[in-house]
Amino acid sequence: MIKTDILIIGGGPAGLFSVFEAGLFKMKCHILDSLAQPGGQCIELYPKKPIYDIPAYPEIIAGDLIKKLLEQIKPFNPGYTLGETAVKLEKNNEGSFIVTTDKGTKHESKIIAIAGGLGTFTPSKPNLDNLEKFEDNGIDYLVKDPEKYKDKIVLIAGGGDSALDWTLFLSTIAKKVILIHRRNGFRGAEESILNVQNLKNRGLIDVLTPTQVVSLKGSSKLESVFIDTDGESKEIKVDYFIPLFGLVPKLGPIKDWGLEIENNSIKVNNSLDYQTNIKGIFAIGDVNTYPGKLNLILSGFHEAAVMCRSAYNLLNPGKKKILKYTTISGVKGFDGSKKEAKRTNISKIN
């Protein structure tokens, strides 16, 4: 039995930052995640993708953000159960929650913070014959290591931000990038659309619309695809085909825990502390929903800070805790290390 003050289900940015905020209150955290390493979507879906809306960072690579968060929480020495999925929730006679994983590991805590992002993901796949034959053998649904596409011919299909962003990114790595979309209009960010248009105008990439892949060809690996453009079929040679049609999120077993669910998200009380309908269970980050919710990493950071203050009150009823600004008090970890505070004053590509 693993015992902790706060059991955090989900090791993405919001879950990791919760460790820091809890540590300021001297609360111990344990992170439970189905992935083999902490980082959530930033590591699993787009580790090399730049992020632009983290305060103080005009641009930061997703994987680097996770590294900095792990460095920030290191003094608080969180525990980890990785590669296991939370499946069962119970409550014992002492009022603590018992969470059991799919591998039988039990965790005991009076506070649970669900920070599981959008849940587990299943890619939306194109309806093509022999698709499974080429999966991970020429067909990728996620870009984990951009360097694998160096000097290769890459076909990207999709009309959203992911398709546009990876077209821009891989255009500097791949031998050739071809972007196709079944419609003329793209639904991504206007700046990305303009940048893709600019690359096309300069002859650095190909953009074909309205176009879609209709069949695949290859012996031991993908060698070419047949595309259809306005009823005309054409074979083009490719090394990789990356269909980016979105990911379908699923809450998994958590949906059966008695929590209020709305559109695959957990309803919380945002006017107070992001607590669910079950006292002692909070939901922060993309997994929760409330009026005015913004699915941004920085929103998860705020929710984590508020949640930890409420968790302290639940664990220490009647005990007042005054948290000083870290610019005054510094940060002291469980290992005795301390950082002293310094006293200083829709569009179209033609």
Image (tube, rainbow, N blue to C red):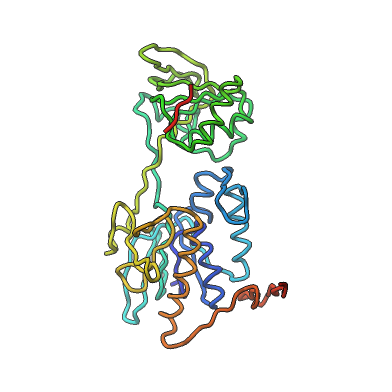
Q: Position of residue 123 (x, y in %)?
A: 40, 39
From this view, report whether residue 164 is shown above or below residue 310: above
**Front in this rendered view, residue 346 or 222:** 346
Question: Residue 40, position in %: x, y?
Answer: 49, 53
Asked if residue 300 lies left or right of residue 343, the reply is left
Relative height, residue 318 to residue 125 (above, below): below
Where is residue 121 shown, x and y percent of the image?
Answer: 40, 46
Q: Please tell me how many numbered marks the rendered image carries.
A: 0
Up-down: is 203 above or below 330? Answer: above
At horizontal 42% and vertical 26% (from top left) the residue drawn is 181
| The N terminus sits in image quarter | bottom left
Q: Position of residue 281 (x, y in %)?
A: 36, 69
Q: Which residue is depicted at the point 65% across and 77% down?
A: 328
Quarter of the figure with residue 332: bottom right
Q: Residue at x 65, y 73 (%)?
A: 327
The residue depicted at 60 percent of the width and 47 percent of the height is: 61
Say left or right for 232 vs 19.
left
The answer to whether residue 103 is left or right of residue 301 is left
Q: Image height check: is 155 above or below 306?
A: above
Given the current orientation, which residue lies at the most extreme bottom position? Answer: 318
